[in-house]
Image: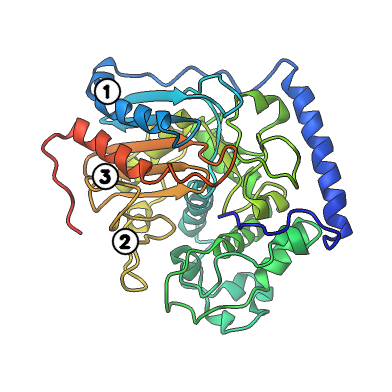
Amino acid sequence: MPSSKAVILSEAWPTAMRSRRTLFVAAASAAFVLACTPGGPPRTDPIPVSAALSMRLEPAARVLDSAIAAGAAPGAVLAVSVGGEHFVHSIGQLAVDDRRPPDGRTLYDMASLTKVVALTTLAMMAVDEKKLALDTPVVHYLPQFANGKGPKTFVTVRDLLLHDSGLPPDPVPGLWQTTTNRKSAIKAALATGLDTVPGARFVYSDLSAITLAAIIEKLYHKRLDQLFAERVTQPLGLTRMRFLPPGNWRDEIAPTEIEPFRGLAALRGSVHDENAWWLDGVAGHAGLFSDAEDLLRFGEWALAGSLGRRFEGAVQPPTEFITWTLRQDHPVGSSRGIGWDTPSGVSSAGTIMSSRSFGHTGFTGTSIWVDPDHEVVIVLLTNRVNPTRDTPKFGLIRAVVADAVMRSLFPEAVPRAK
């Protein structure tokens, strides 16, 4: 999650930061030029939509419409898969200053959905291939992780995925404020000390994801974006899901926040999270972009994995997919699966999706939830941080929309047990 900033630009910033900013502004200008030239994301056929399902989900669409009209976000795209049928509904506009409507192929900054869609998937594959073992200490793969305060030699790969490693939520100050490039930023992240002993308590941590990504990159000798493309998006035909969208895709990306120290316009195609941006836009905790249709297709692949079924595609879900998506109850009371989250209390999954469901949210206003019991996938993409992250009207929109979808599909469904 992006950290708040009391100071935006000052003479205290390193010279490298000011140089990096100059390069960024130049790159942004180049991206704008590219955006004005022919090209853009691959023009794949829209996902087939069921007219009958669209009628059933009309009440859910109206709920989302009302939330956007009330100012929850500039626009939104809702995509649902149930029993192999699809529904896609969009409302609003691309940004507060871009009145064009979004659709199922508008790209959004996935934020922390990167953790489950990219990082957790690649970690599953590494375990499946016996390159990675969940209960092996992190220092076995990254000896330098031992640097920093606390008993870091006892932190395991599983701890990173359960967010109980003892690492703090974020590096403070941010990596973008204290380091000069991706290599030095990862080195600094790995040297972060523990706040508590491993396994003692749940603390949602971007540092855990950054650490796990460093392990994956070392195991495969490839950067995360290249590995994810080769192992996941290309075999599954997900042509509009990727890290680092090219400049000539810019026109089809929903903008996020205006961050003055990164330029005068809202970010559009550059990852919103500051630390991920400093990691050259490729990180385990953020950096992925996708449209709703490709994310829905990924959700169907994940659904097949959670049911132990084969998927009609070039790559099958890892064999341990079911186990990874189950609540681990570790530490006691945590809602986390291995990488994934599960519903609990006031959840973004709402109150009706089953306790077997798994999913995740992203700070920019994104979410995906998969319910194996009902064989439902719900994707909700918004850019609620445009033009600012101060968006109190966003509230419980994810939960309200999820409940509206489930009530429309399953009128007899009752709220799940706590």
Horizontal side, residue 1 vs residue 175: left or right: left
- Please report the residue visible at 56 percent of the width from the left and 20 percent of the height from the top: 99
The residue closer to the viewer here, 51 or 366, is 366
**Residue placed at 84% from the left, 36% from the top?**
26
Tag 3's secondary structure?
Answer: loop
Give residue 311's quadrant in the image: top left
> Taking 358 as reference, is 240 left or right?
right
Q: Nearer the viewer, residue 155 or 349?
A: 349
Q: Is residue 118 visible?
A: yes
Label 1 with label 2: CB-CB less than 8 Å: no
Label 1 sits on what residue type?
Answer: Glu
* Tag 3–tag 1 contact (CB < 8 Å): no
Q: Is residue 318 above or below residue 133?
A: above
Q: Residue at x 66, y 40 (%)?
A: 258
Task: Give the residue type that dot 3 points to.
Answer: Pro
Task: Specify which label sits upstream in the sequence, 3 or 2.
Answer: 2
Please tell me which residue lies in front, 411 or 162.
411
Question: How far across and how far down the image is residue 236, in percent?
Answer: 49, 34
Q: Is residue 403 above or below residue 344?
A: above
The residue identified by callout 1 is 58
Element at label 1? helix
Q: Quadrant of residue 302?
A: top left
Alpha carbon distance from label 3 to label 1: 23 Å
| Residue that numbered label 3 is attached to | 372
